[in-house]
Image: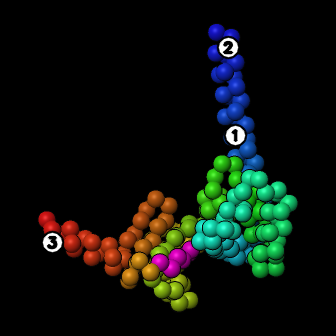
Amino acid sequence: MRGASRVAFADARDRLTEVVADAAEELAVLATAAAAGGAGNLDDVEDELFRFGRIASGEPELLAALSDQRMPDDQKRALLDQLLSGKVAVASLRLITQAVINPRGRNLEANLADYARLVADWRQRLIAVVRVATELSARQRQRLTRALSAIYGHGIQLNVIIDPRVVGGMSIQIGDELIDGTLSSRLAELRRHWAA
């Protein structure tokens, strides 16, 4: 029985350690968001976290280097400084570096998405991932942001992904909700209808 008690205690200690680490990570992200808000560049931070995650996921060599556990942390920091210093907000560089140096079992894109969500939560905004075939104009972005804000009753951060597979229209994902207004999904629906 003593052995079982030790195992249960060790499991409880490990879970508690993980919860404390999660809380510390979240507090660090929120403190960085608060500092960025005070500096007036919180919009930039949200956008830069999203964009860097997309860029890194599209560059396998960069992603491999940043994910390589054999590469020393100081070399990863130097690589990120070389790539991003002066090009992104200081808070963005701090959060991206944190996501790379302490992945805590998650991939970089997932870490950055979590950080962007926390930054948006700090602002009490929702993140809308919008997939379109071509870039939206500033006016289209404003109209879409206003419409989604009115529907959801919160501020909206648009993260736009150019995806040629969309063909026309757009899909919008906010949390678990997907609004699929793409031409390809409508054509697939028609095919299913005619096949039935």
Report, in whole angstroms, how far the alpha carbon at label 2 lies from the one at label 3.
64 Å
Picture quadrant of residue 194: bottom left
The reply to whether callout 2 and callout 3 are in contact (CB within 8 Å) is: no
Residue 13 rendering spot, x and y as whole percentages: 71, 29
Which residues lie in the magenta part?
158-163
The residue under label 2 is: 3
Q: Residue type at mark 1: give it.
A: Glu
The residue under label 1 is: 18
**Quarter in which the C terminus is drawn:** bottom left
Q: Residue at x 78, y 69 (%)?
A: 80
Q: Residue type at mark 3: give it.
A: Trp
Indicate the secondary structure of the residue bearing disc 1: helix
Residue 131 rendering spot, x and y as whole percentages: 47, 75
Report, in whole angstroms, how far the alpha carbon at label 3 lies from the one at label 1.
52 Å
Confirm whether the magenta stretch covers residue 162.
Answer: yes
The residue under label 3 is: 194
